[in-house]
Amino acid sequence: MELIYREMTIGDYEAAYALWMKTEGMVLSSADSREEIEAYLVRNPDCSFICEEEGELLGTILGGHDGRRGFIYHVAVSADQRGRGIGQQLVQLSLGRLREAGIAKCHLFVLEDNEIGARFWARSGWQKREGILLFSKDTT
């Protein structure tokens, strides 16, 4: 069986959302609606990917940038498919596209109680930042 990596389209949304719902440590919100994800993909073309095998979605990554810094969201791999390098390959694909867009640095957010995510990123060579506080506010 062959793993296929390709750019994510809105046609992948239902399968991606189902994977995100099953992914321990991932928190979803109204920003993850079909409409919001479609808008994200339009604003950030070419940086989001999926992995599939025999038509089954196994992994996702949402990547984008603001013109200065890259951001990665929703890296998820089916629990029964972990250890095959899918997450690492998705990250490399997205980072490669960010580099092509002239983006030299990328950030991501991990909830502090998401041990699986924290281990993945630490093993992957990402540096945990200290001294940064994140503030959020709804615009409505």
Image (cartoon, helix red, strand yellow):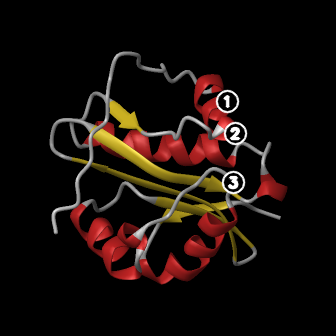
Residue 123 relative to residue 111: left or right: right
Q: Which of marks 3 and 2 is nearer the N terminus?
A: 3
Location of the N terminus (image quadrant): bottom right
Location of the C terminus (image quadrant): bottom left
- Which label was assigned to residue 104? none
Answer yes or no: do the residues labelled 3 and 2 have beta carbons within 8 Å? Answer: yes
Residue where numbered disc 2 is placed: 116
Residue type at the position of mark 2: Ile
Answer yes or no: do the residues labelled 1 and 2 have beta carbons within 8 Å? Answer: yes
Crowding around mark 1 (Cα neighbors within 10 Å: few <14, some 14 to 19, many 20+) is: few
Residue found 63% across the figure and 75% down from its top: 18
Image coordinates for residue 24, horizontal then vertical, percent: 69, 54
Residue where numbered disc 3 is placed: 24
Image coordinates for residue 13, horizontal then vertical, percent: 50, 78
- State the residue lying farthest toward the top: 130
Residue type at the position of mark 3: Glu
Say which element carries label 3: loop
Q: How many marks?
A: 3
Residue where numbered disc 1 is placed: 119
Residue 48 relative to residue 91: left or right: left
Say which element carries label 2: helix
Residue type at the position of mark 1: Arg
